[in-house]
């Protein structure tokens, strides 16, 4: 009788909006999720296919989904064979975390860390009180100031940096740079969805 509750209560799949008859995601959406690789970046699919998932994760009720997606990212990291010392997340703006009560990227990162048997650590703080990324124009996102992130301490070795979505790649680039400046020998990335995998400036980082 798996999924009967969801069926009875009319829960819908956070991936596609169809009626859900099993936990977390419908089989069609599960089938879309597969670790994909760019140089130094693992992700689970295009924003066109998976764009609803990061939106769903903004709500605390979908924590179990974030844990599941974090495990999928861990699988991609294992496939890539990166030698990591720890996992960290791109921090959200403080007031957004207070409003929502949690940072989805952090839950993804903690889940991936657990699956990889690596420590999770908050290594970066976000400074500034800019508008939400989704409310900005592409140009404004590109102009994200250099000093957006600052390390909370020194780090060593190779780290995995997790975020929910990679749009222009600017946020990731800034956070990655801050980690390298804090002493990381290498910084790999992981995200659920990438907006334009083919034009991402990731390989030039
Ligand atoms: Zn679905």
Image: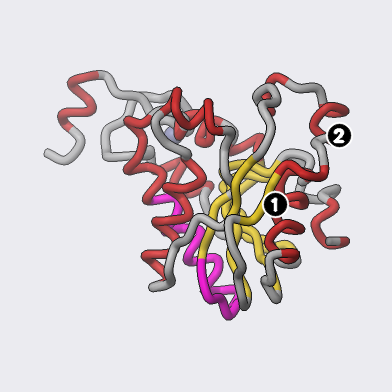
Q: Are marks 1 and 2 in contact (CB under 8 Å)?
A: no
Q: Nearer the viewer, residue 119 or 146?
A: 146
Q: CA distance from mark 1 to mark 2?
A: 14 Å
Magenta portion: prevailing SS class = helix
Query: Label 2, on which residue?
Result: 143
Percent position of residue 182, x then y? 69, 65
Name which residue lies at 87% across and 28% down: 139
Q: Is residue 97 above or below residue 66?
A: above
- Residue 192 painted magenta: no
Q: Earlier in the sequence, mark 1 or mark 2?
A: 2
Percent position of residue 98, x then y? 44, 28
Q: Which mark is residue 175?
A: 1
Q: Residue furthest left?
A: 1
Percent position of residue 118, x then y? 43, 72
- Residue 79 painted magenta: yes
Question: Can you tell which quarter of the image residue 117 is in?
Answer: bottom left
In screen coordinates, is 145 left or right of 14?
Answer: right
Q: Residue furthest front?
A: 153
Name which residue lies at 83% across and 27% down: 140
Name which residue lies at 41% across and 25% down: 18
Q: Specify whether residue 44 is in view.
A: no
Span shown in magenta: 68-86
As helix, strand or loop, the secondary structure at mark 1 comes to: helix
């Amino acid at each position: 009788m798996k999924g009967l509750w969801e069926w009875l209560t009319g829960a819908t799949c956070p991936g596609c909006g169809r009626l859900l008859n099993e936990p977390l995601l419908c089989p069609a959406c599960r089938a879309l999720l597969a670790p994909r690789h760019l140089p130094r970046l693992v992700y689970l699919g295009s924003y066109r296919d998976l764009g609803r998932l990061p939106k769903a994760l903004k709500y605390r009720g979908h924590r179990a989904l974030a844990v599941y997606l974090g495990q999928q990212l861990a699988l991609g990291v294992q496939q890539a064979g990166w030698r990591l010392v720890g996992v960290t997340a791109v921090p959200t703006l403080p007031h957004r975390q207070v409003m929502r009560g949690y940072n989805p990227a952090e839950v993804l990162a903690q889940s991936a860390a657990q699956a990889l048997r690596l420590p999770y650590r908050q290594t970066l703080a976000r400074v500034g009180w800019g508008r939400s990324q989704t409310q900005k124009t592409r140009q404004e996102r590109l102009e994200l100031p250099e000093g957006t992130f600052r390390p909370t301490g020194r780090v060593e070795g190779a780290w995995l940096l997790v975020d929910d979505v990679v749009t222009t790649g600017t946020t990731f680039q800034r956070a990655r740079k801050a980690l390298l400046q804090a002493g990381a020998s290498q910084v790999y990335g992981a995200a659920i969805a990438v907006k334009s995998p083919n034009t991402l400036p990731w390989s030039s980082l």
